[in-house]
Image (cartoon, rainbow, N blue to C red):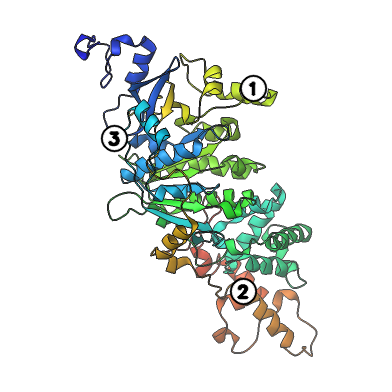
Amino acid sequence: MTESEAPPAKAPEGVSGAPALPQPVLEIASGYAFTGPALDLGALLWDGRCLPDVQIRIPLPMLNRHGLVAGATGTGKTKTLQLIAEQLSAQGVPVFLADVKGDVSGISAPGQENDKVRARAGEVRQEWTPAGFPCEFYALGGMGHGIPVRATITSFGPVLLSKVLQLNQTQEQSLGLIFHYADQKGLELVDLKDLRAVVTFLTSDEGKSELKGIGGLSTATAGVILRSLTAFEAQGMSPFFGEPEFDTSELSRVAGDGRGTVSVLELPAVQDKPQLFSTFLMWLLADLFHDLPEVGDVDRPKLVFFFDEAHLLFNDASKAFLDAITQTVRLIRSKGVGVFFVTQTPKDVPGDVLAQLGNRVQHALRAFTPDDQKALKSTVKTFPNSPYDLEEVLTALGTGEAVVTVLSEKGAPTPVAATRLRAPESLMGPVDPAALDRAVQASPLYGRYAEAVDRESAYEKLTAREAEAASSPAPSAPAEPASSRGRGRKGDDQDSSVVEQVVGSGVFKSLARSLGTQIGREITRSIFGTARRRR
């Protein structure tokens, strides 16, 4: 049947042979016939057939309304991320991808045409052209292939660090008091040994009296935190905290040709530390939230952030942590940042967070066990009403197929559409490690972050103070109370730094009244308790 024979009132734009299609298909086609810029996901699947005339798309302005990419292992989630990231980059939008398995680095290299790629492109009517995209590769603490990403303990904050240390709610609150104490006294916490030094001081004979002044922190709880820090450090976690601290504005860069830079955080070397890398991803997002200006609704996102293995973030999370995630996701949209959580089932994401996710790409689910069947039914309930039998469809989808619903240009949910997805145009697999290392070392950012710096901070200052106290002659008069030690030494006021003075309790009291030194005043904490020095 030709286009001229189609009834004009029912034929959605861009759909040929529309009269031969069932009414539900026409309604789906109309729901995805966007007029503005959009990302192409693939072609509609209906009644076992792929209909290339009905293209399924996501409006570009709606990418900052967040999303979910879900599905069982091996169903094609990673390739979906790659497909979306490519098109965002091509339209000038920077992208952040967490590469947990080590197979996303191929986005930097042109893809390789083969029979499968040609077949998929033909099925969905895709003009497939091999292409690589501008990339920067990062690695947590320099463990693995990539530019080292580090955070200072001060900026990481107590809420996120408690998640990493697996502290309970009481211990998390106590750690928050320790951070508050350090902030107020100008004791900057750069790395783990700085925090350990402050906790050690607070549990020492000299420091115990200070515990009473910061909200009744118990010596026992401080001891638990100290032991957790020691164990954490013994597991080789030290490289992740320190300086130079990563500037998250690097993630919003655009290449010279106008394409958005794809920032790939290589995580294979820390796959066995899921609590660490998932929490570090949240730090990156929280830091962006802290620094980016409000922009409201924009024509295109400023950055799209893909949060892989999202279930690890929510496992055993405290209420404060979950509340902070929910608030961050809710508010960061107005700063032009879109967040996509990637996990196996929607039930891995708390309901309050799931409610913020406007775009859904659901790959196949398995129903081999009673728990699987329960998860399947729960997933189906999260979709809008649909002409599909979603329980059947979701268990029958093949690799590279998904059920999609997104927000239209008007912000309304589109019809549910089973979709055969397009093939990525970049390499669907990892690049050679040697080539990856060359790309990392050629980056202009490499010289900025490659070498760790261990400058003078809380550990060095407290250690110097302890050494000074140990070398001083014993006083002939009765020893002063701990609250007055460190005062009355002639010349010290001129020669001592602020941090050297704060370990004297008299100075502590003065600083507490004035809300800290200039350094302390510059520390402002965001939703997660993260902090960023003024740039």
Pick the front one: 103 or 294: 103
| Mark sitting earlier along the chain (3/2) | 3
Q: Identify residue for label 1.
A: 373
| C-alpha separation, residue under disc 3 versus residue under disc 2 | 57 Å
Q: Residue 337's x, y, as percent?
A: 41, 44
Q: Residue 530's x, y, as percent?
A: 54, 55
Q: Residue 80's x, y, as percent?
A: 45, 36
Corner quadrant of residue 120:
top left
Pick the front one: 9 or 210: 9
Q: Residue at x 68, y 84 (%)?
A: 468
Residue 332 drawn above or below residue 234:
above
Residue 531 drawn above or below residue 478:
above
- Mark nearest the camera among 3 and 2 is 3
Q: Residue 157's x, y, as percent?
A: 58, 56
Q: Identify residue for label 3.
A: 37
The amino acid marked with disc number 1 is Gln
**Callout 1 crowding tier (Cα within 10 Å): few <14, some 14–19, many ≥20:** some
Corner quadrant of residue 459:
bottom right
Q: Identify residue for label 2.
A: 502
